[in-house]
Amino acid sequence: STPVATFSALTEAMKNGLLFKGGDYLEMLAKIKIVAFDKTGTITRGEFVVTDFQSTRPDVSLNILLYWVSSIESKSSHPMAAVLVDYARANSVDPIPENVTEFQNFPGEGVFGQIDGENIFVGNRRISRRAGCGTVPEEENDARGGSTIGYIYSGMNLVGTFRLADACRSGVADAITELKSLGIRTVMLTGDSHAAAIHAKAQLSNVIEVVHAELLPEDKVRIVKSLKEEGPTAMVGDGINDAPALATADVGISMGISGSALATETGHVTLMSNDIQKIPQAIWLARRTRRTII
Ligand code: ADP
Ligand code: MG
């Protein structure tokens, strides 16, 4: 029993690049009081640039590190992975994914693979525990512009580090300001470090109110659940590691294109254009439609 008003609103939304999986989500969108945003790939472009890549041991060459990392990351769909593969190629090192066995993805942490008899872990400082290394690298301060720091372990030994920089999408600060003017609170949820999260917040002129960092996918779910107790909550994410949080939210909005793939499976609404500014517009449309129905 979809009223004509809902149908025409869904059509209008579609023209604006928002694909709803049903009129119920349009109705729910009208009631949203809190919007939680993923950082990497959602607030930021997820188009990383390698700004630093170093061996931390004299007996481990840069070339072997590039070979290990690129071969293993060839098997990952994370936005960071392709960049690391390209970086190796640009430094004349060809990845050989066929040499990788036992590949494992640890969402929100990094990846693992066996290559030429070595156990290699690549990820954030949390991956040190997967590697069985007793010391977790200390979180670095924001001195180098909030870039994301990666760690490479061979077995239990830290053998290399790298830094990746990412930029915020245009229009995000404006979109968040508009959400505020609609009486909506905003939150950033990220698996990345506190420093990288605070850097992204500053890039948005601090319009986003609350930041939670170093989250695993299940931590995002837990926070979305607790936000829902405060009011109807939407979650905007990029489908990579965010699917559980998107499903938990009252309205899960997924970025239409994550990495290179079209992602319409996750979430209740797909933002085809990846334009965050369409979100306050859609809420405004949903509210108007609700008034028309009532
Ligand atoms: P976000 O919540 O900001 O979207 P993710 O949950 O996708 O971030 O990832 C969190 C962190 O986990 C990344 O910042 C990175 O440090 C690490 N990570 C995840 N996947 C990989 C990977 N394939 N290679 C290296 N690091 C990774
Ligand atoms: Mg993400």
Image (cartoon, grey):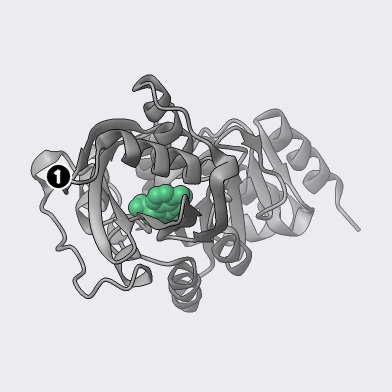
Looking at the figure, which quarter contains the N terminus?
A: bottom right
Q: Is residue 266 above or below residue 178?
A: below
Q: Nearer the viewer, residue 140 or 285?
A: 140
Q: Position of residue 181 (x, y in %)?
A: 38, 47
Q: Nearer the viewer, residue 183 or 50?
A: 50
In the displayed structure image, the side of residue 86 where residue 161 appears, left or right = left
Q: Disc 1 marks which amino acid?
A: Pro
Disc 1 on helix, strand or loop? loop
Q: Residue at x 13, y 55 (%)?
A: 140
Q: Residue at x 72, y 34 (%)?
A: 14
Looking at the figure, which quarter contains the C terminus?
A: bottom right
Q: Which image quadrant for residue 97?
A: top right
Q: Nearer the viewer, residue 11 or 94?
A: 94
In the displayed structure image, the side of residue 252 where residue 21 appears, left or right = right
In the displayed structure image, the side of residue 53 where residue 232 appears, left or right = right
> In the rendered image, which residue does mark 1 sit on?
58
Q: Position of residue 231 (x, y in %)?
A: 49, 71
